[in-house]
Image (cartoon, coloured by chain):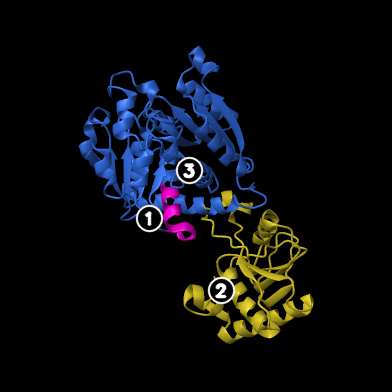
Amino acid sequence: MRHLLDTRTLDRASALRILDVAEDMSDTQSREVKKLPTLRGKTVVNLFFEDSTRTRISFEAAAKRLSADVINFAAKGSSVSKGESLKDTAQTLEAIGADAVVIRHPGSGAPQTLATSGWISAGVVNAGDGTHEHPTQALLDAFTIRKRRFGSDSRGRDLAGLRVVIVGDVLHSRVARSNVWLLTTLGAEVTVVAPPTLVPQNVSLWPIRVVYDLDEALAEGPDAVMMLRIQLERMNAAYFPTEREYSRRWGLDARRVAGLPDGSIVMHPGPMNRGLEISSEAADSPRSTVLEQVTNGVSVRMAVLYLLLAGERDDERGGDL
Amino acid sequence: MSARTVLHEADISRALTRIAHEILESNRGAENLVLLGIPTRGVTLAHRLGALISDIAQQTVPVGALDVTLFRDDLAKHPTRSPQPTEIPAGGVDGKTVVLVDDVLFSGRSIRAALDAIQSVGRPSIVRLAILVDRGHRELPIRPDFVGKNIPSARTERVNVRLVENDGSEEVTIGE
């Protein structure tokens, strides 16, 4: 694998390979010594143009558990705030000797530009770009669903026939987009639930079903309910009348959780707005996988960094895993 | 190119039976023994040895798998390898006599990686090495304690171990 830029172009075999390697990484994380020597001597740069705590820490932990050196580069307080271009920043990282660049950027497509421009030879991992994609989040969500469903028998399995409901601000959500592509590639049936104002216009091109009423979607007994964060920082227009009304119609509360069938799980990528899209009872219930998702995130990111950096560098041969 | 068979089914079976006896002899019984196979065929051999030893000593010997992929020092020289599952038996390896089991001993690099991998799961009191075929050409100061068969080979030759459980047939061949 040369880069990980999106899940839309990730085929089933490549996705399963990442998830299966993540299983092996996850096993090593329950050992006495969690650190592996695998990526000794490799340098991973976390290039974050947007605020992020959990994704950056997760990538940092993943790289360190594999013995890679980690350089954190936050755009705030850096040369970027002095007006440096992405190209100059990238070339600086190249000169430092970065083997992989993990990039988060407010502009959709920035990781793609970095990977295809020829500015750097490092592998690029998209850690969230604008409203485009957040592939490692979708991979850790798929990993979590598979793990809850199949336990230690997860290796090699896809999500065929599982039903996943994604609820909330789909319009602004790169997590939703990455999940739609990945989960459907893995054979799951995806239903999106949102207020009509928060559904993207081109949604008819997605391989999913759209429902506007949460209770209607939950009545079908989905295997997983994925709540999206209401991104208050992107709410510059009136997408819904009040937070209270949103919470009542599209929020996951104790009553809605109680109505779910046995075995179905409640997911949230974090950070949660407790009381808005998810109530505390739902977030802290035994069905909630919020903390498992964080743990699994480290294993999935270890797998991605391993597949990107461990083998022979295939610069010429392109993006095959 | 033609590959010639150097070990037939009966030879493999005799070699494993002898190794099982040797392990029991050097360990003075089956007490404290743990067999760890190195994927893929080492795991199959470890399970066979485990069954043989349990039969002879009338005592069950724990058998597991130890993947060494993440501990290799030659990852960058090959296309990306997929790790295999590691399974450590319930009793762990702390204070035990661990016998590593692999099919072919060549450069010794897998075994070096295995010694690192074992450290991350615990601290055995003794680590020994059982090998079905030793073909020479060591690159590291590593030697086996139990050997099925020494097969002198040229560095460029391929030694192939086929086992019924993995490959559907049972033989060791050497060829170009």
- Spatial separation of the CA atoms under disc 2 and disc 1: 32 Å
Q: Residue at x 69, y 72 (%)?
A: B130
Query: Looking at the picture, which amino acid does disc 2 mark?
Result: Val
| 2 vs 1, front mark | 1
Q: Are marks 1 and 3 on the same chain?
A: yes
Write down the chain letter for disc 2.
Answer: B
Residue topped by disc 1: A158
Q: Secondary structure at mark 3?
A: helix
Q: Amino acid at mark 3?
A: Gln
Mark 1 or 3: in front is 3
**In the rendered image, the vertical position of residue A200 relative to residue A223, given as above or below:** above
Chain A drawn colour: blue
In contact (CB < 8 Å): disc 3 and disc 2: no
Residue at horizontal 31%, vertical 52%? Answer: A187
Q: Is residue A48 left or right of residue B33?
A: left
Query: Marks 2 and 1: same chain?
Result: no
Residue A293: mark in rendering: 3
Return the residue nearer the eye: B63 or A40. Answer: B63
**A319 w.r.t. A44: above or below:** below
**Number of other residues with Cα within 10 Å of mark 2, as a class: few under 14, some 14 to 19, many 20 or more:** many
Helix, strand or loop: magenta stretch: helix
Q: Are marks 2 and 1 in contact (CB under 8 Å)?
A: no
Tell me the tag on residue A283.
none
> Which numbered tag is attached to residue B161?
2
Residue extent of the magenta highlight? A142-156
Query: 10 Å neighbourhood of mark 1: few (<14), some, or many (≥20)?
Result: many
Residue type, label 1: Asp
Q: Quadrant of residue B56?
A: bottom right
| Element at label 2 | strand
Q: State whether residue A30 is above or below residue B16.
A: above
Q: Which chain is yellow?
A: B
Q: Residue at x 35, y 32 (%)?
A: A173
